Image (cartoon, rainbow, N blue to C red):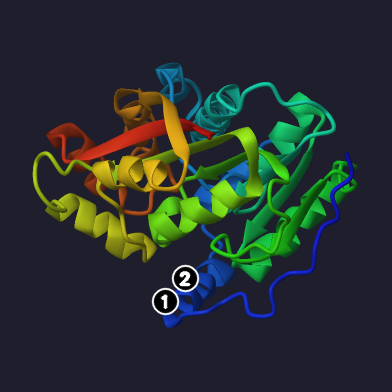
Amino acid sequence: MTIARTPAPAKVLRTEYQKSVASYWNKEKDPVNLRLGDVDGLYHHHYGVGEVDWSVLEGPEDTRDERIIAEMHRLETAQADVLLDHLGDVKPDDWLLDAGCGRGGSSIMANARFGCHVDGISISEKQVEFANHQADIRGVGDKVRYHFRNMLDTGFETGSRKAIWNNESTMYVDLHELFAEHARQLEFGGRYVTITGCYNDVTGGRSKAVAQIDQHYTCNIHPRSQYFKAMTANDLVPISVVDLTADTIPYWELRAKSSVATGVEKPFLDAYREGSFHYLLIAADRV
């Protein structure tokens, strides 16, 4: 099946908030993203999961930081693998969408695993430029391309996607608008997957720690229940929910000991440990 990569809507940034988010990511050159990506050329914009190899703290002091960086990158790549594990039966001629693609690491991993076509979208023109360069370097630019587009109105064809994912990018948009657009683009039976932090509305509103995370990233973390309400309202039926909270805490403990710590490590660890914040994977089918 051939799907044309349709022209983008004329106006990508539609609100002052979207402009501010785009400006933040256009200027961002955080070593916690760039140095980790330099390990193997897969640049992610998400966190990690899995057991930490704490032996990286041992050994020669002059290479300690290099070992920590490599271990953090291993954990963030493992997180992307967990997401890809839930995309279902993807074939080489299928088309996928990476919504809020960052610098593109997960899209390249999806193509490497499935041989499929992937379009990544971001409202950061700098991220799009960077990601396309990485795809070209790897020789996969014919199947993996990145676009300056808005995930709430991509311009891609209705029913054109076998699978769509958001990896830590849903906190920048209204969930009902997002899932309506995803449902439009997914084929019947197509799969949607998100990994996201969400606040625990059983314990009340945003905790102080969650509010500090919002402020750090200029985002708006949603309550856990809102994901399920917005999905069911837009013909997306959850089939798998995985609580990754315990699996991500070791990553944050290691990151707090690294040279690329940003100061947001304590709010994350406090929020996870007190139970006010959860790290979830949700997979849903388009019905």
State whether residue 122 is above or below residue 223.
below
Q: Is residue 65 left or right of residue 269?
A: right
Pointer 1 and pointer 2: residues touching (CB < 8 Å)?
yes
Instruction: Answer few, some or many: residues within 10 Å of disc 2's Cα (few below 14, many 20 plus, some between 14 and 19).
Output: some
State whether residue 13 is above or below residue 239.
below
State whether residue 254 is above or below residue 179.
above
Q: Position of residue 74 (x, y in %)?
A: 56, 28
Q: Residue at point 47% right, 23% down?
A: 56
* Rendered-image quadrant of the N terminus: top right
Q: Residue at point 36% right, 66% down?
A: 218
Q: Is residue 92 left or right of residue 17?
A: right
- Find numbered disc 1 in the image and state the secondary structure of the residue it sits on: helix
Residue 107 versus residue 137: which sits nearer the camera? Answer: 107
Residue 147 versus residue 287: which sits nearer the camera? Answer: 287
When asked about the image quadrant of residue 8, the answer is: bottom right
Counting the numbered discs, the total is 2
Residue 67 versus residue 212: which sits nearer the camera? Answer: 212
Q: Which residue is mark 1?
A: 17
The residue type indicated by label 1 comes to Tyr
The residue type indicated by label 2 comes to Val
Instruction: Answer few, some or many: residues within 10 Å of disc 1's Cα (few below 14, many 20 plus, some between 14 and 19).
Output: some
Q: Is residue 66 left or right of residue 266?
A: right
Q: Which residue is mark 2?
A: 21
Residue 34, can we see it? no
Q: Residue at point 81% right, 56% down?
A: 133
